[in-house]
Amino acid sequence: MESHPLVYIRTDGNETIATGHLMRCLSIARALRKRGGLPIFIVSDADSILLLQKMMTPDETARKAYPVIHLQTDYRNPEPEIPVMQRILSSHNVSFLLVDSYFATSRYLSRMSQICRTAYLDDLQAFDYPVDLVINYDLAVDASFYKSAKSVLTGSAYAPLRSQFSLRPYRVWEQVKDVLLSTGGTDPFGIAGGLIRRLQSFPEFGDVCLHALTGPMHTHRAELMRMAEEDGRIVLHENVSDMASLMAGCDLAVSAGGTTLYELCAVGVPCVSYAMADNQLPCTKAFENAGLIPFAGDIRNNPDFLEQTAQKLLELSLDFPLRREISARMRMAVDGAGADRIAEALSRA
């Protein structure tokens, strides 16, 4: 194997599938670079390239630290790209191909594995993946499901978070002053605005600052901007580069299932979770069953979702000993070093 292991990363991101795949793969790519590896991204379309570039630092962009190969294909149908991938992977001494896509089929992964060692980043357990390595960082995973993979890495120790979340100092204060509302890049259900209105009605939250994540793709961005103009307690955050610091400055949070829950655990911010998609349900329920993050339910089938979520936040805000205990358990469950552990596995001869 080459002294600088070459790792191709096949993933995508856009308005439909969001940015989570790109973000966690970039975290792994950065960890690979620290180990002397050479990560190269392979994406379907221009949307993925633009999103990936926005996630990079100016220095990374200037140095062209993470080259990107543009396939110009349909991310929803990867099998037609197999001949192109074969040419790319066969032309170099590849250490690993890492695939992170819900649309990868058994045939696709099997063909990739015939060319080079292939890893799959999984959180669905949709089928038994015919690859060399499977990574699933869910809290509760039945590793016996993966019978075809030669090696399996499971558990929250492999959550591929950005380095900013590793060993982040955090203090639980007796009085809640700041609450973070993380409702996804688009927030199609208007959760941020609905929760803000309900929390504003609580006398106990009269002096509490409500921090809402938003951005250009946020469906209700204009509404949130109006609300922020009318109430100084509402602070909007866009294009946040240091999310760990923003989280560390908050006493409570609410978030949909996904990587953000692992980030909140790594920092230690007591949180309430919810689901708005099927693939978020296993994650949110696992965190609740582990006694880490209470689950407020699925907004799609719960007409009282906003009220129940606000009540759970209120209950946590009034119970300082419980918040302190939960924060400690969260930090024990997720240490923020998962990307480095994955990079180590991808760098092995």
Image (cartoon, rainbow, N blue to C red):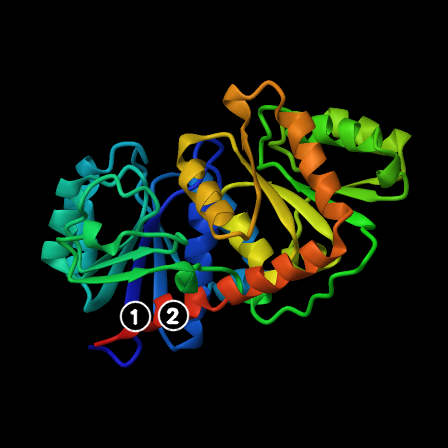
Q: Mark 2 is on which residue type?
A: Arg
Residue 239, image x and y in percent?
Answer: 66, 47
Task: Name the one closer to the observer, 289 or 15.
Answer: 289
Tag 2 near tag 1, CB within 8 Å: yes
Q: Helix, strand, or loop for circle 1? A: helix
Q: Which residue is mark 2?
A: 341
Q: Residues under labels 2 and 1: Cα distance?
A: 6 Å
Which disc number belongs to residue 345?
1
Classify mark 1: residues with Cα within 10 Å, few (<14), some (14-19) or many (20+). some
Residue 253 horizontal side relative to residue 102, left or right: right
Point out residue 87 in the picture as x, y percentages from the top left corner: 16, 53
Q: In the displayed image of the protein, which residue is found farthest to the top?
A: 303
Give the residue displayed 38% in from the left and 38% down from the top. 45
49 with respect to 90 (left or right): right
The disc labelled 1 sits on which kind of residue? Ala
Q: Is residue 334 visible?
A: no
Q: Position of residue 233 (x, y in %)?
A: 86, 40
- Picture quarter containing residue 255? top right
Quadrant of the rendering where the N terminus is positioned: bottom left
